[in-house]
Structures are given as structure tokens and as C-alpha cells.
Amino acid sequence: MEFDSIWCLPLDAALSRNERGAGWSEAGMVADFGGRKALLKRQRQYFCRPLWNGLRATPTFAREARLMGLASRAGVNVAELLYARHGSSGRMILAAAWIDGAVSLAAPEAQSESRLRATAAQFVRLHQARICHGALYDRHVLIDRAGVITLIDFEKARRRLTPSWAAIGDLARFIRRSPWLTPEQIDLIVAAYHWRHFPLLRVWARFWR
């Protein structure tokens, strides 16, 4: 498929548009992306300025694609990346496979102990790779019909200096944005982290309450 034809695809169940400076990003489901359903992100002049790149403007979609790849190689289940390209006039496209029948961890029926343990295992792999998701909310944790956990939406992801810093940033955000979590459930998630690999997390865990 050509860039311009993908750009013009209609978005079903479109999400609200994000704006940053003079740029914007929008996303939604595409029913037929080369014969498959996909989550399609369209962006124009939508940049980030990472420290590793000397604060130079970097296309946000490129960082997201790179960190999805890093997370996948670290053993984290991420949505299959189908397309990531930079077009003319500051346009950018990223497409990932749609997960049919999946529910998010925000759904009460998805919040069983076994699924929380499986979710915590994905978090640990992500953070061992020093990747901070940056938007680790319950709605970005999907469970498919087979019970497989997939992390989605890496738009705000970035590398941290240590696994502990990656974990602390994400877990603090996850707990804050998941009011349904009980203290026992939080303890279950934190217990999945081996203190030898996450020494600062042990200190943080004493004060999260």
C-alpha cells in the first residue's frame, strides 16, 4: 500500500486528537489494512526531543516504532508493527495489528489474580530492558481470548538509565491511574520484581502507600 492511500483511509472508532506545538496525532481502527484490521496513527509535524538525540526534533512515530522493537526483543508482547513511514509535508504513519476480541485490564472481568500476575511479568520484562512505557494505564494492557497479555501505545515510551527508574516511573503511574487496585493487588505486582535487579524499587515500595 502506498503512503498517500494509507493516509486517506477512514478511521473507525477514532480516538481524540493529541496536539503538540504546531503538530498533531490521531488514531483509530482501520477495517481493511491490506486485508487486516489495524490501529492506524496519523501524525503531522509531531516531534519529540529525546536527550539521546541531543534534543533534536525526532519524529514521534519513529521513536515509538524503535521502542516497540526493543520491547519485543526483550520478550514483551507488543502489537505487531505493520507499517511505519515518514511522508511528505511532515506527515507520518504508524500502523499496528488490531487485536480482535481483546479486553483491557480496565474491565472488571479482566482483573483476576492470574491475569495480574501475567501482566506483572510483562512489566518486569519491559523494565529490565530499561524501557519506561510512559503511559502505562490499565487501558493500555490488553488481554485476548487466549489470555495473552499485550502492551500497546508506546508513543510516550523512552529508555531510562536503570531498570529501577523505568519501573518506578511506570508503576507509580499505573497505580495512580488504576483506582480499582487493592493494596494486596499492588503488592502482588511489586513482588514480581527481583530486588537484585531493581534495588531502588525496594526503597520506593516502602512508601507507595
Image: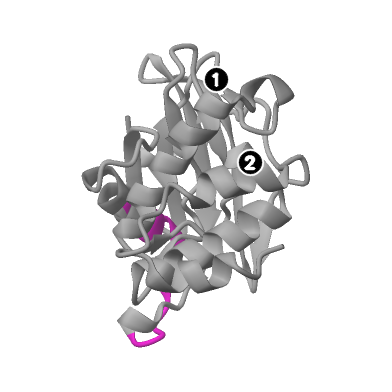
Q: Is residue 69 left or right of 57 when viewed as pictured? A: left
Q: Amino acid at mark 2?
A: Gln
The span from disc 1 to disc 2 (Cα, nearest Å) is 22 Å
Question: In the rendered image, is residue 107 in sight?
Answer: yes
Count residues near mark 2 (Cα–Cα under 10 Å), then give few for <14, some for 14-19, many for 20+.
Answer: some
Question: In the rendered image, is residue 45 in sight?
Answer: no
The quarter in which the N terminus is drawn is: top left
Q: Residue at x 63, y 71 (%)?
A: 22
Residue numbers of the magenta segment: 54-65
Judge whether residue 64 is colored magenta. yes
181, above or below 33, in the image: below
**Residue 168 position within the rendered picture, expressed as x and y whole percent measured from the top left:** 52, 66
For residue 139, the mark is none
Count residues near mark 1 (Cα–Cα under 10 Å), then give few for <14, some for 14-19, many for 20+.
Answer: some
Query: Residue lying furthest left in this view?
Result: 73
Q: Residue at x 56, y 57 (%)?
A: 171
For this rendering, which residue is in front, 83 or 51? 51
154, above or below 139, in the image: below
Mark toward the start of the polypeptide (1 vs 2):
1
Judge whether residue 53 is colored magenta. no
Q: Residue at x 72, y 62 (%)?
A: 209
Element at badge 1? loop
For residue 185, the mark is 2
For this rendering, which residue is in front, 37 or 124? 124
Q: Amino acid at mark 1?
A: Ala
Q: Residue at x 72, y 56 (%)?
A: 176
Q: Write down the residue under mark 1.
A: 102
For this rendering, which residue is in front, 71 or 33? 71
